Structure formats: C-alpha cells, structure tokens
Amino acid sequence: MSRYTATIHGRSYSIVTEEDGSITVNGQAVQVELRRTRQGPLLVSGDKTWEVRLLQADIDGDSINVALNGKVIPVFLEDERSALLHSLQSEKATRVHSAVIRSPMPGRISKLLVSQGELIETGQGLFILEAMKMENEIKAPCSGIVKHISVNEGDAVEKNVVLIEIS
Amino acid sequence: MGLRTVAVYSDADRDAPHVRAATAAVNIGPPQSSASYLRADTIIETALNSGCDAIHPGYGFLSENASFAHAVRDAGLIFIGPPAEAIRSMGDKTSARALMTARGVPVIPGTDGALRDIDAARDIASDIGYPVLLKAAAGGGGKGMRIVEREADLQASLEAARNEARAAFGDDRVFMEKFLVQPLHIEIQIIADTHGNCVYLGERECSIQRRHQKLIEEAPSVLVTDKLRAAMGKAAVEAATACGYVNAGTIEFLVDADTAFYFLEMNTRLQVEHTVTEMVTGIDIVKTQIQVAQGEVLPFQQSDILIRGHAIECRLCAEDVRNNFLPSTGIITEYRPAQGFGVRDDSGVVSGSEISVYYDSMFAKLVVWGMDRRDAIRKMRRALDEHITLGVETTIPFCRFVMDHPAFIEGDFTIDFVQRHFTPELLPQPDESENVAAALAAVLMQDWRRERPENGVPEAGSKTRTCSPWVSRHRKRGY
C-alpha cells in the first residue's frame, strides 16, 4: 500500500494505492486505469479519457507538471515520508526557500532596482532582465530584506542562476 | 505557383521546419540575428550563389529595411516588396507624417520632426497636452515607445525611449504625438501593382494589444460600417500612392469613439496578421505579392473584393501569461496543431524545436474562419483547446480568456482591453474532475516509474533517459 498527498492550487487530495490495483481518493474508491499506448499514456477514469504527459517542473520543485490533453496542471506530490518531513519543517524555512530569486532565462541585467539591505514589499520590482528583445521586470515574490545581490548591472546571466536572496 | 525556393537559416535554426520545406537551404551564420538574419550582404550573396531570381523578406528582420531593398535591386535581384524609396519615406515616421498631411490624410496632433532635446519635448507636450506618446522614428513593434502621463516623467521616459530605439534600430531619434485615450487600432491592407492599380482588401481590427504588441487580430471589425470601410480604404490608397507604393502594405489607423480615424503609420511589408484578410477575402496575399513582383497586373479590381464571414488570429507566443508575459525558453517536447474546417495553424516549430533567447517568442499563429463573428469565436475556442504545445509556457490561456470575455464577445473593447480586463488571477483554474485526474495521473505515473525504472518515463521532456535496447544489452553483457 502506498499513500500520497497531492496538492493542486491549494487543494489536497489523499490518494492510496493498494497492491491489488485498487485506488481511493479521499477515502472514496475510484475506477481508474493508466493505459500505455504507442502514442503515450492515457488516463481512463469513468467515461473520460485524458492524454497524460509529465513535464519537468520548475527549479527546486517537488512538484510535477502534469499535462492533461495539453493543459498543464502543477501537482505537488508527496509520499508518506516526505509529507511527514514537510510537516516538521517550520513555516519560516518555506518562506526563505521561496525568496531565492533566480534568472528565469538567459539575458542581461540591464538595471538593478533594489540594493542590499533594502526593505521590500511583495510585487516590488527587483531588476530588469533584458532578454528576447524585451525588457522584463522581475518582481519580488514576497516581502523581506534584500540579503544578498550576486550580480551587477550589465552582467550577462544564464538561466537559473541565483541573483538575489531575500529573507 | 510551382516555384523553387531557397531558405536561409542561422545555426540555431538548422533543424527548423522552414529549412525542410524549401527546395534548398543555406546556413548564413551564428544564432545572433546581427550576424545572420540581419546580414544583408550575406543574404544577397547567398541568393546570387544559389541562382535565385527574387528575395522575399518575410515580416521580421530586414523586411522594412530600405537599404536592403536597394541592395537587392542593385544586385540584379527582384525584391518582393515595395521600392526602397517607399520604404524609406514611410519608414521614417516624421517624413511619413508630412507626406500624409500634404495628401489630406488625417494625422494625430504631434511633432513634425524628431525631438531635439528635453526642453523642446517639454514645450511641445504642454502644447498638445498630456498624455503624450514618445515613439522611435525608425520604430515598430512597440519598441522605443513610452506613454508619458505628466511632465515629471518626461525626461526619464525620453531617455528610456531613446535607449530602446538605439538598441533596437540603431537610430535614437524619437518623436512625440498626442496619446489618444481608448482608441481602436484598425488597419487597412492594400496591394498595388506596377501598372498603377491599387486595391484595398478591407480592414483588420488589432486592438487586443499588450505594450503595443498585437496579440489577437480579426477581420472585419465590428465597428467598421461599409461607409467607414470605403472612407478608410480610400485614405489608405491615397497614402500608398503618395509614396509611389508597389506590392502589399498596411496603413495603420487609430479610430476614436466617434469613428474619426487618424493615420498612425504604414507598414511597408507583409504583416503577421495578413492571414485574417486572406481568410475573409479568399486572396492569397503572398502569392499576389510574387505576381506583382513579376510585373503582372493585379488579378482583381476593387469591385471584386468581397468580405465574407469572419476571421480571428491568435498569436501563440512562448510567454508565461501568469508571470507578466515573461518569455519562456526551452524545448517544445510535444507540438500538435489544431485542425478542421476553417482552421489554419501556421507554425514555425515542430515537436523537438527549441525556443531560444535569440528570436521573437511567437512560434505559431492560430487562425480561424467562421460564418460570422460568433461562429469564429466558438471555433477559436475549440481550436485553442485542441492545439497542444508542451515544454514551454504559452499565451494560449490568455487567448482563451479573451475568447470567453463578455467585452470581447460583445465587441465592446478598445486598445486598453488587456490593461483593463486582464489579470492572471482571472484565468480559470482546473475544475475538480481535472484536479483529481491530474493527481491520479501523477501518482500512477510515479508508481509506474518505480515498478519499471529501467524503462524510465516514455515521455519526451523528462530528464529520465530511455536507452536503446542495444545499449542496455551491451551493458548487461559487461562490454
């Protein structure tokens, strides 16, 4: 028996799979089958059939991007052990985790809008990343203090490089 | 038309679909467009070496570059587009303005020349009244463009506009005009031959824009009556003949609430959204461009042009609509265009293509034709749901949002539609049955991976590699 917790847009689903193949969602038995076809896996549940693709989720992700008929749904999936670990972590740890700002794509830092030690608000512009012929403003995902800035104006950066840390 | 074609490509586009579609394809340099697609000399040399008669410049890069058009003709080749002189006089926004004023085509109040300095800018702005719009003289596509609400912001905006203009066009001249609040962007497609004929092919409504970049276009416009169409068409033909125009071109107008229209600029090339005009007129514009370039007489007259049904185009871009339309790069792991009657899914990519940082984020254009506007909207919804692009974020959720929005459906919108109506929070979340299915899919795929780790996951895009049976057999034997 395996127990999972899947969280999608803030809603949690507890899923239990048994050795005999039976499955429950939030304690209710469901009829579901994963069909492996030459065109890729299909999820059949009741009278519905979905094409399933797993996509690589964003950096630092425990989440899986599931595409159903081409529509991408991010699923945060935990098994029993990682769910336990997660519940033991303090909320603070989660917050610090989310405040590492990485470059979303390769480009050039055309302007820094904050300085080290500055108190910032959620949604405040952090820097301008010039990429694909456009100037893109990258905003703070949370409020806090700018702990560290690892780049200078004019620097070329690769994708996923840590640029700013907020705590 | 039975023509043989030679494609050019940069190192980044070695495997692009256009390379395979052409009769032959030639590499013209590294990925940076300045070293490949913008190298006029290399492109002309390539055309000469491969025995081409003509060059079609497409709608990016050198398509509106007068020097390029000139050089192509100097090399003894046909440029499938307007004469260099027409590109030059219309490409320079200031001279275009003067030309239109002289011909009685209405223009928006503003400067007749490029802004000298900040002091001159201040004077003119207070003259015509805020808000004002700063535009690059050599511009297009929203680059080097800034709306200034008050005098305090003028200096910073002027500098920013100049910097962007210099970076994008190598020309930092900027001019100013009055910013019309909530107009519509409506443009007229024209095509002229070398025998003095010029025909307009109706209008395109392009008001669904973000940062002056068009996102969705349609034809005809809900606002344009037969009478207005005829008036705008006449002005457009006047504009084209004023600069000795030949071949396909577009005159962009801003139309205010009282249906007064003002000349905005002329695009002296084929446009991205020419497809909607093709759908409602039945005229293949690119084919006609080639006929005109060969010196043929236009195969139709003004009285032949009928607007039938309704067409909509959604530009599909690799951008994250939930994150400020941030460009999204990566490999397209799976690509499947929409199909069906009246659906045209023009793509520049296939499964496995990479969206790189080098070029524009638009990877496809989804165009539909319907009996009327409602029919076209319904068909677009279906086509957007059917189209699959995985591996990068796309603007499909945004397009779907627009197709479902009451203001769009009712035709009750202006150029500020996106600003006024769109926030990512309004995008629909998956419903309960989709959530459960996604959760189950994640679990079952995870279980499957554990059961058969040697097989990995059969999908493209997963980091788990599936290795060939020959390789694994080799490994098991211990070679």
Image (cartoon, coloured by chain):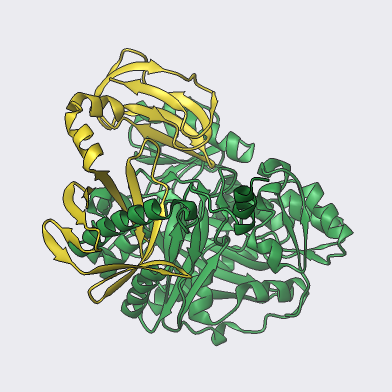
Chain colours: A yellow, B green
**In front: B9, or B109?**
B9
Residue B49 in the image, given as x and y percentages of width and height: 88, 58
The quadrant the N terminus of chain B occupies is bottom right
Instruction: Report whether B119 appears left or right of A57.
Output: right
Using the image, determine if residue B255 lies above or below residue B181: below
Picture residue at 12% right of the left edge, 56% below the top: A26
Which of B310 and B204 lies nearest the eye of the viewer? B310
Residue B401, relative to residue B453: is it above or below? below
Q: Whole-percent x and y of residue B250? A: 56, 64
The picture places residue A77, in percent across and down from the top left corner, at: 27, 46
Query: Where does residue B387 sit, x and y in percent of width and height?
Result: 43, 67
For the point 83% across and 62% down, the residue is B77
**Which residue is painted at 72% across and 46% down in the image?**
B36
Q: Is residue B108 visible?
A: no
Relative height, residue B396 to residue B302 (above, below) = above
- Residue projecting furthest to the left: A27
Q: Which residue is at a point 55% across and 74% down the rendered structure image?
A: B200
Left or right, B56 with respect to B447, comes to right
Please count the marks in the image. 0
* Residue farthest toward the bottom in the current orientation of the protein: B304
The answer to which of A31 and B229 lies nearer the viewer is A31
Q: Nearer the viewer, residue A12 or B93?
A: A12
Q: Classify residue B101 as left or right of residue B154.
A: right
Name the outermost residue toward the front.
B477
